Image (cartoon, rainbow, N blue to C red):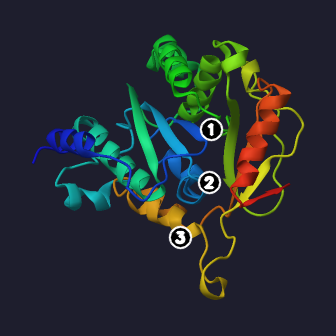
Amino acid sequence: MPVALLLALTLQGFTSPATVPTHGPSILIVTAHPDDEAMFAATVWKAVREHGAQVDLALVTDGAGGYRFSTLAEPIYGVNLTDPAVARASLPAIRKKELMAGGAVVGIRNYFFLDQPDEGKILDVDSVFTELWDGGWVQRRLSSIIEKGKYDLILTFLPVPSTHAHHKGAAILALRALDSLPASIRPAIAGSMIGGGEAVESFSGLDGYPLTVVPAQAPVVLDREQPLGLDGRLNYQIVVNWLIAEHKSQGTMQTYMNAGSHERFWFYAINSGASVNAGRDLLLSFGLATED
């Protein structure tokens, strides 16, 4: 079956599993690539599976640039994925299918595909807006999604200078979209990074992009390795690994299994004091959180 047809059938028939509660807070995740949602996997699992949250995901790029480490997936999909021309035609559909399979694990409800070009890893975020994406259209689309969704919380990658320009660009556009809405209807918005249990360097904002400013405040920290089950032998890193395993076209993604024991969330300065308090309380309510 052609990949495009398979994706169409998957999208048509996809619903969140019946076991997922349909009440509770609502969260929007804005990411650049299929597989970025692994950053939030333990949080999403706890939010949806144990606290009845509804989580949607807005994906900015088509994921076509992620072909360089797809060797092991070629016999699975029957496509020469390491050939750039072949990959750019086939990967968008494959990676959306992988994204939705991983999303079914943690309970993501709905997807918004914005299909901006993915030209591979770069660091210069300015070029994302000047050469790659229709930033104005993405901003307006995200504003519409946020306004209609009436979310309690938006999550992005924290746009640290060393990260992929697409990650930074997606976060900036989410912030711009939120900034364009009346303050009275804005949900809280936070940027996330994964890491170990030790304290991490602070982030104050990305030069040239004032909306990315983060006040000097400790992040909310969620521990993926919080023990559970018989004799405490299980933890939420298992859930993260389940999600990662669905991204078979992304070979290096598999090396992140069991990496990063903590998910950290910083609230941007664009938030009102009330929004920060509400967002922090929401994350803390999921039961994995401690303060740095």
Q: How many marks?
A: 3
**Residue type at tag 1:** Leu
Q: Secondary structure at mark 3?
A: helix
Residue receiving disc 3: 238
Which sits in the foreground, 279 or 254?
Answer: 279
- Say which mark, if any, is on residue 43: 2
Q: Secondary structure at mark 1?
A: strand
- Labels 3 and 2: the sequence-earlier one: 2
In this rendering, position of residue 34 left or right of residue 200: left
- Labels 2 and 1: the sequence-earlier one: 2
Farthest residue to the left: give it.
1
The reply to whether discs 3 and 2 touch (Cβ–Cβ < 8 Å) is no
> Where in the figure is residue 147, as x and y percent of width and height?
55, 20
Give the residue displayed 38% in from the left and 55% down from the top.
17
In this rendering, position of residue 108 left or right of residue 171: left
**Residue type at tag 3:** Ile
Mark 3–mark 2 distance (CA, rounded to whole Å): 13 Å
Q: Secondary structure at mark 2?
A: helix
Which sits in the foreground, 73 or 94?
Answer: 94
- Say which mark, if any, is on residue 155: 1
The reply to whether discs 2 and 1 touch (Cβ–Cβ < 8 Å) is yes
Quarter of the image for residue 163 reads top right
Give the mark toward the camera: 3 or 2.
2
Mark 2–mark 1 distance (CA, rounded to whole Å): 11 Å
Q: Is residue 161 visible?
A: no
Would you call the spot at circle 1 few (<14 residues within 10 Å), some (14-19), or many (20 or more)? Answer: many
Farthest residue to the bottom: give it.
231
Give the residue displayed 65% in from the left and 23% down from the top.
175
Give the residue displayed 29% in from the left and 46% down from the top.
14
- Say which mark, if any, is on residue 237: none
> Where in the figure is residue 76, as x and y percent of width and height?
22, 60
Position above or below: 50 against 193: below
